[in-house]
Image (cartoon, rainbow, N blue to C red):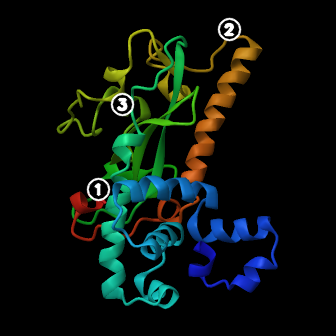
């Protein structure tokens, strides 16, 4: 159905190999059909009244991040219909987070149980709150960042925190700071560092070397085997970020949140 909604006919779908159809599906919706099927199962279980085509329209918008005038031509709906549907459906997509991203999945026997890193995303300038706090040195412009922890022993996300201003250091974010501005500096008592079970550790890059009791980083004196394993764990984290940014809304500069800084952060 996804390819039909995208404009492909049954004849064109049938005469193509599975790989070509999968590539076309991913180009429109970001992930493969099997992943979307699993997502739809959870989504409709929680929100059974959603419209099937509108779900695909929302996925297509997240993937392509097209303006509503272009979406109106592709999906044969007017802008007055598309915009509120997108906002409503994205909120319902996000409502699945509570049941999916949890901290109760640590392996009881393993000591090193998670990997952690922060990911940067571009946004329009914070015109109502201009400051170098928003400056993203990686992108050369305004940005926000999220802290993400993945389970090492299962294919699960166990923690997401953000968005915060792009200039805050990864380790400061891990420790619970919400800004690098000394006048506004305060600690989030529910930060990830305070929720790691006793005896458990994670893997991070050199930016986390200041917390050796919580985060293991690659350093001198480690065996070659250990360094290779740490490299694979960190590479897996980067692969996750790469897949997130296969959606253009995450890859390109975020243009929404026109009502001010708080509105942009909330979106």
Where is 259 relative to 181, above or below?
A: below
How far, Cα to Cα, is label 2 from label 1? 42 Å
Name the residue tied to disc 3: 172
Q: Are marks 1 and 3 in contact (CB under 8 Å)?
A: no
Q: Is residue 224 left or right of residue 158?
A: right
Q: Secondary structure at mark 1?
A: helix
Q: Nearer the viewer, mark 1 or mark 3?
A: 1
Q: Of the residues under marks 3 and 2, which one precedes in the sequence?
A: 3
Q: Nearer the viewer, mark 2 or mark 1?
A: 1
Q: Position of residue 231 (x, y in %)?
A: 68, 28
Is 93 in front, or is 118? 93
Can residue 142 be seen from the camera position used here?
A: no
Rendered image: mark on residue 6: none
Task: Measure the C-alpha gap from mark 1 to mark 3.
Answer: 19 Å
Q: CA distance from mark 3 to mark 2?
A: 26 Å
Residue 130 at x, y = what percent? 26, 59
Going by the image, does 107 lie left or right of 160? right
Q: Categorize mark 1 by other alpha carbons within 10 Å: few (<14), some (14-19), many (20+).
A: some
Task: Please give the residue where the numbered disc 1 appears in the rendered image.
Answer: 265
Give the residue at mark 2.
221
Callout 2: SS: loop
Q: Position of residue 191 (x, y in %)?
A: 30, 29
């Amino acid at each position: 159905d996804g390819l039909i909604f995208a404009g492909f006919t049954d004849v064109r779908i049938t005469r193509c190999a599975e790989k070509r159809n999968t590539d076309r599906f991913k180009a429109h919706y970001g992930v493969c059909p099997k992943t979307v099927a699993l997502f739809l199962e959870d989504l409709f279980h929680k929100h059974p009244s959603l419209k099937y085509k509108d779900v695909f329209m929302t996925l297509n918008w997240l993937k392509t991040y097209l303006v509503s005038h272009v979406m109106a031509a592709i999906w044969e709906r007017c802008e007055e219909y598309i915009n509120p549907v997108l906002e409503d459906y994205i909120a319902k997509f996000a409502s699945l987070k509570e049941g999916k991203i949890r901290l109760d999945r640590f392996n009881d026997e393993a000591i090193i149980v998670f990997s952690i890193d922060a990911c940067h995303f571009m946004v329009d300038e914070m015109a109502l709150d201009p400051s170098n706090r928003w400056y993203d040195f990686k992108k050369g412009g305004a940005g926000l960042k999220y802290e993400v922890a993945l389970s090492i022993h299962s294919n699960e996300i166990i923690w997401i925190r953000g968005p915060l201003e792009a200039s805050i250091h990864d380790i400061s974010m891990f420790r619970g700071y919400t800004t690098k501005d000394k006048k506004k500096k305060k600690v989030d008592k529910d930060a990830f560092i305070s929720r790691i079970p006793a005896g458990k550790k994670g893997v991070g890059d050199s930016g986390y070397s200041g917390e050796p009791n919580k985060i293991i980083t690659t350093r001198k004196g480690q065996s070659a085997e250990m360094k290779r394993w740490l490299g694979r764990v960190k590479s897996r984290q980067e692969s996750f970020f790469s897949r997130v940014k296969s959606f253009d809304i995450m890859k390109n500069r975020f243009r929404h949140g026109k009502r001010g800084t708080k509105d942009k952060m909330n979106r």
